[in-house]
Amino acid sequence: MGTSSSIRISGHGYAELPAVVDLTDTASGTWVNTGLQVTLPVAGTYHLDANVRAVLTVADGTNVWIGARLFDVTAGAVVPDSEVLVQQIDLHVSTATPAITQGVNQHAPILVPYAVPGSRLVRLQAVKVYTGPAPAVARVQSDGTGRTTLRYERVA
């Protein structure tokens, strides 16, 4: 997976997910690095915000969710309080009716302050967790119908 570039303008930065992150074949509960990342250039307190778009398609009997979080690659730790449930589908159809398939797109924001002692690389990670049949589609993506982005602003 490639990495994204960020635009830096005096304490600000912005990046967009450079490629679809397909979680369909990953094990349930496995966090996956995405190519969406920014470098916080110097020590300070930053406001980090992300907008995450997820796509799920499931069959009857599946309970699945996609989560996201920010991970400080430099420190090797999750950015505190950055975990978010992006999308969940819990689909159960009566046995008296034919099984159906349901697909959903959804966005979720991450908004956190983060104080760092020096330059840090922060990356978006995603996870798929499910019970029942595996989802047919589970991914994080960004395109003209919805962007997955990460932005920072140094505030102190």
Image: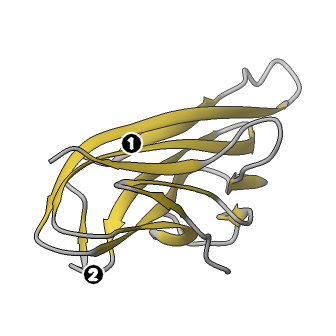
The crowd level at tag 1 (other Cα within 10 Å; few <14, some 14-19, many 20+) is some
- Where residue 28 appears, as percent x and y from the top left, is 51, 64
- Where residue 86 appears, as percent x and y from the top left, is 51, 39
- Identify whether 1 is placed above or below 68: below
Which residue position is annotated with label 1?
Answer: 84
Tag 1: residue type? Val
| CA distance separating discs 1 and 2 | 21 Å
Residue in the picture at 73% in, 37% down: 146
Residue lying farthest to the front in this orientation? 10
Residue in the picture at 64% in, 32% down: 106
Residue in the picture at 46% in, 49% down: 151
Depth order, front residue of 92/156: 156
In the displayed structure image, the side of residue 61 where residue 36 appears, left or right: left
Identify the image's colour scheme: rainbow, by chain, secondary structure or one colour. secondary structure
Depth order, front residue of 10/121: 10
Which residue position is annotated with label 2?
Answer: 74
Secondary element type, mark 1: strand
